[in-house]
Amino acid sequence: QAGVTSTRSLGDLVATAALMYAQPLPTGSAVAVVGNAGGLGVLAADACADAGLTVPYLGETVERQLRELLPAGASCANPVDATANVPGETLRRCIDLIATTGHVNAVLLALAPTALGDPLADLCAGSALRGIPVVVVAPDRAEAVDLLPAAHGEFAVYTDTRTAAVALAHARDRAMWLTRPRGVVPHLDRIDPDQGRAVVAAYLTAHPDGGWLPPDLCAALLAAYGVAQVPWRLVGTADEAVRAARALAPLSAARTVAVKAYGPELPHKSDVGGVRLGLSGDEAVYAAYADLEHRLGNRLAGAVVQPMAAPGVELIVGVDQDEVLGPLVLFGLGGTTVDILEDHTARLTPLTDLDGKDLIAGSRAAKLLYGHRGDPPCDVDAVEDLLHRVSRLADDVPQIAELDLNPAIARPDGVTVVDARVRIAPRHPRDPYLPQVR
């Protein structure tokens, strides 16, 4: 998202940097493999496939032209085996031909050591620069990654095919990122940043070290950014829970309610059995609250009573603050199994319209949201709107250390936030010398 190229190892990082420095970026995934030994060429082609690149058919015309250039016995299909006795000048002409066909986006030259000369030295007598990148694999080189000067420019030279292919794949991804539209940050109505900041400032005045917002302040903060929750009431006794359930049950299609434990030391209610769902009738609600009170003791500061929400796709929308990256918006499948599913995608704020779509598309929730096995599609626009509101909230109120909307239930008629928790922490002025990626 921020244009950072991330590799799996320091070696791959150096290899990718060398290629990006010495050669133009490939504009696609198609690679022509040219070598002086069939086995090494096949290894290079396999490495390209493993890295997500393709080794396509070069076409009848190109193969005919290669046969005219290369020694007898050469294999002119991709990967091209130019044979061990191919002169360096011929290799150079072969690369020039392939680079101008438009069939491929890069050339990987795989040169096995032979006793018949040094084709790499002959290659460097000409230019290293063409319209597409040319990378060289030379297993007999002393350095795993090297830059070899040519008459014009430099070749990136590697000792193994995997490293070369991975570097090409990263360079391809970089080229694709550079051509990606930047997107726009959408305008949002029904937001009141001043009200949101005031809620957080009042809490920090009373709690200088920060902490988890109580339900009323959490709802007020979300409401300032147009994020509405399922109706709820905070109760402190079993009798209050019964009265709240009587008022809220008619809002549920099944006329049932949920009773959820609340306490500053209970941020994860499900872990302590603090959530009771689908309760019907005064006795069930009274018993549920009494049970919570008995088991949780002094940790229980009250309970939240809500009407049961209609079923749908359970999602999690969250925020995590990073000292260097800044706020991250998280998205994925939610519910009580969120830690088991580990279905999270993340983007830096502020989210553009494209970032919001990428968050959804990158999650396993996407298949369910767009309709699965005959189910009607959910209101994806409403999910995107929720993501953008949370992004704006995280940008405007940096004191939000953590935010979880879990679950937010998506349905064909919109998205409903069922449960929310927000942790506030005091924030100090940002160090201007810390790097920023956006």
Image (cartoon, rainbow, N blue to C red):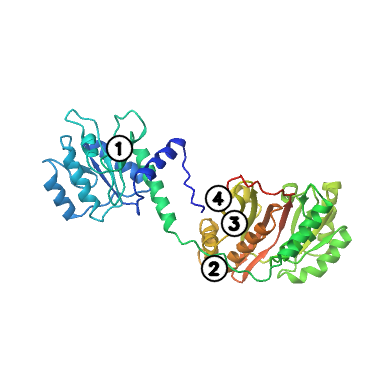
What residue appears at the point 66 percent right and 52 percent down from the top-left corner? 336
Circle 3 is placed at which residue position? 349
Point out residue 253 in the picture as x, y percentages from the top left corner. Answer: 70, 70
- Please name which of the two marks, 2 or 4, marks the residue nearer to the observer: 4
Task: Give the residue type that dot 4 points to.
Answer: Val
Q: Nearer the viewer, residue 44 or 400?
A: 400
Q: Give above or below for 140 relative to 76.
A: above
Q: Earlier in the sequence, mark 2 or mark 3?
A: 3
What residue appears at the point 74 percent right and 64 percent down from the top-left corner? 194
Badge 4 element:
loop
Badge 2 element:
loop
The circle on residue 434 is none
Circle 4 is placed at which residue position? 437
Residue 229 seen anywhere in this rendered image of the structure:
no
Point out residue 383 in the picture as x, y percentages from the top left corner. Answer: 59, 65
Point out residue 369 in the picture as x, y percentages from the top left corner. Answer: 55, 63
Circle 2 is placed at which residue position? 377
Task: Give the residue type that dot 2 points to.
Answer: Pro
Give me the C-alpha separation between circle 2 and circle 3. Answer: 27 Å
Residue 427 horizontal side relative to residue 154, left or right: right
Badge 1 element:
strand
